Image (spheres, rainbow, N blue to C red):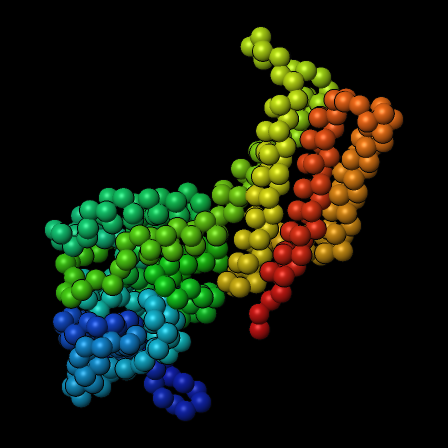
Amino acid sequence: MKNNEDDRTTTCSNDNIKKPYISVILPCLNEEKGISMCIESINKVANSANLDIEIIVVDNGSTDSSVEIVQNLSIKFPNIILEKEPIKGYGSAYLHGLAKAAGKYIFMADADNTYDFEDIPKFIEKLKQGNDLVVGNRFSGMMEANSMTFLHRWIGNPILSTLVRLFFKIKIHDIHCGARAISKEAYSKLTLYTLGMEFASEMIIKAAKAKLKIVEIPIKYRLRIGESKLETFSDGWRHLRFILLYSPLVIFLIPGLLLFLFGIISMLILFMGNFSLFGITLYFHPMFLSSLCIILGYELIFFTGFSRIYAVTHLGDTDKIIEKLFKLLTLEKAIALGSIIAVASIAVFVAIFVQWIGSNLGGFDQTKNMIVALTLAVVGIQTIMGSFMLSILGIKEK
């Protein structure tokens, strides 16, 4: 699949070996029924469009004849590269293939013949126009009947794609589409980690956070050949979990702040006197709810920090706010703050005990003060323990 045009190949300055213009990556796990059709189709496109393409087939532990089929085809098509990735997972296979890709542009698709490889030139053209990542849209009116289950087509994919659009301001309507293309230069700006199906979401979300230019194009989608590897609920949850991990503002911080502020304000009002609502006098009992809101809200705020720090230290994300907070709010300062709050709670308990002794161990109402002391004690301990956890998560891996 050689090409003589200057812009279709690149040359390695060290060994003067020409690199392919496009690297096509096909993850393969028991795809004996579709892999040969995919390879034949790719090479047909390479010939008709005069493109220099290498085909990287990443075997992910196939137990059928997929590997043998690829090896036999490599005799006919020398542009085939067979790689083996022992760690199972959609993302794991792609990470291996992306590391081996030598092309200026990289095209990714499944090996089950669901995608039409005649669309490759359209993807590459969009990259040549200055876009960094091009994602296919299977919902553009060219989807073959029964090629996607009802649950995936009308519930799972639309909901998750909507969440990504809302949380990350990305104008993509099919974040799980397996057909996509990215320039080698753009890929070098991404740090991808996930090994499962959530890899599809990770690539788009991190591309958006890296300010890469992302565009969507309509593509054909056909009924797959062979058995599907997608697990509806477990893989759907993996996608949702990753999306939420990168959206702590929505899932943790906003609810946490609302609960915390509501708890503080309502506790102050109830502590100062008996508050009446709709003719009903509220004594100390609602303060238990106020305390619960303060504790839960405070914990959710900590969870925001947990998720952001984990994303920075373990998933290659960047966050200037977190970096500044780590410099300002050290573990020692947080422990000191937590200790002050805990000591305040002890002081209240001691004051109550002294008054009790002074009343000759008689009965007297200190319920409101007890609720305040209990709340301070929990918040103080949360501050100390949460700070230790933040510090642990802040340890970066090599």
Q: Position of residue 265 (x, y in %)?
A: 66, 26
Instruction: From the viewer's perspective, tell me whether residue 232 is left or right of residue 307.
Output: left
| Residue sitting farthest toward the bottom | 15
Task: Answer yes or no: is residue 53 visible.
Answer: no
- Vertical position of residue 126 compared to residue 4: above or below: above
Q: Which of 49 and 173 lies nearest the eye of the viewer? A: 173
Q: Position of residue 36 (x, y in %)?
A: 15, 75
* 380 with respect to 235 (left or right): right
Depth check: give the residue in front, 396 or 57: 396
Q: How many marks?
A: 0
187 relative to 218, above or below? below
Which residue is painted at 20% across and 46% down in the image? 150
Furthest toward the left, the residue is 145
Q: In the rendered view, would you say 359 is above or below 244? A: above
> Quarter holding the C terminus?
bottom right
Residue 188: image location, x then y, percent: 46, 69
Residue 244 seen in the current view: yes
Residue 149 image position (x, y, % from top left) = 19, 50
Return the residue nearer the eye: 82 or 172: 82
Q: Quadrant of residue 47?
A: bottom left
